[in-house]
Amino acid sequence: MSEIHGLGVHAAGAQLLPYKYDPGALGANEVEIKISHCGVCHSDVHLIDNDWGMSKYPFVPGHEIVGTVAAVGSGVKDRSVGERVGVGWQADSCGICEWCRQGDEHLCAKSQPTCVGRNGGFADKIRVNSRFAIPIPEALESENAAPLLCGGITVYSPIRNHGVRPSSRVGIIGIGGLGHLGIQFAKAFGAEVTAFSTSKEKETEALKMGAHNFVNTRDTGALKKVAGSFDLLLSTVSADQDWPAYVAALRPKGTLCIVGASPSPVQVQAFSLIGGQKAVSGSNTGSPRDLFEMLDVAGRHGVKAITERFAMSKANDAVARVKKSQVRYRAVLAN
């Protein structure tokens, strides 16, 4: 097998530079994927800058990967050469712990992220355990499918796991890279969907994506007006929020689920949870099983990421725009 050519970061916050590495022999359970597209996720920016203190340099970022299988290891039975597949945040897990056994590989203590401690998808090829190379339905275009592999599953999992159905009232907080997909998936589940945003100008777009209602959170009275309204509130933003007001906006037994990491501790009064049996929860991407299902739902219900396309060689430009939150709504690199 030949060298892999990618774009690597050699120090925290540095520019991406051409970087090649020898991946060694193909593992028995691995597939090698020829990459056509790779999304640029906010997590990639955090890893490039080492905001989470877990980056090891040099490394190749990228974990929203679409491509075709170019080679399969001797033990691979579930993928074949030429098949179009996607890879998300995770590239491997132990396969034998209780979480892996029950199909929650993303909760495995030995979960191997795609671009932490290994090289990711800003490259021409990548290798992963075949279980984490998920077939892409024909109905999905590669460019629109790439951001579903991290951004899409991040919002799909909580909508599914919190039992959203046609009787549900769901609020999506933040209409960005995650939120614009959350609106579409919540609508696909048949829920009544309300979009929350600080940007009044996003109202028209949010309604076009499938939201039934819009709340401008800069209007202090607007949140009070929707008190006691929601079964699930999904917070996709990475800024601090008025958490007590969102807890107040839940119906009895409602859940505020957080998928965007706000910088400060989330503080709510115990009584505000106790009275209505409310909950505050978090959600972590999803398992291969969840990814299969999410891609199938996206294909059948026309859920797609709204993308801005960049050549792989222009990855630094894409990262700069993502960092400044200038992309509507997901940046995708194309080889």
Image: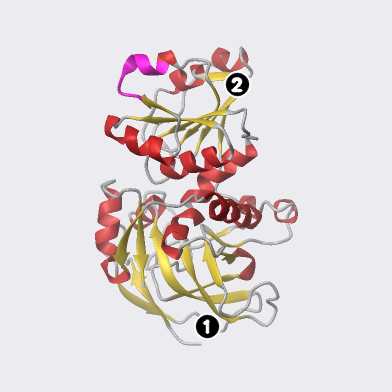
Q: Is residue 164 above or below residue 128?
A: above
Q: Is residue 95 left or right of residue 223?
A: right
Point out the frontmost of discs 2 and 1: 2
Residue plotted at (46% across, 45% down)? 181
Asked if one can make out residue 86 in the rendered structure from this viewpoint, the answer is yes
Give the residue at mark 2: 278
Type of the residue with mark 2: Lys
User: Judging from the image, what secondary structure is the residue with disc 2 in?
Assistant: loop
Type of the residue with mark 1: Gly
Give the color scheme: rainbow, by chain, secondary structure or one colour: secondary structure
Give the residue at mark 1: 24
Q: Which residues are magenta?
A: 216-223
User: x and y percent of residue 295 in the render?
Assistant: 56, 55
> Which of the pair 135/150 is nearer the observer?
135
User: Judging from the image, what secondary structure is the residue with disc 1 in?
Assistant: loop
Residue plotted at (29% across, 32% down)? 199
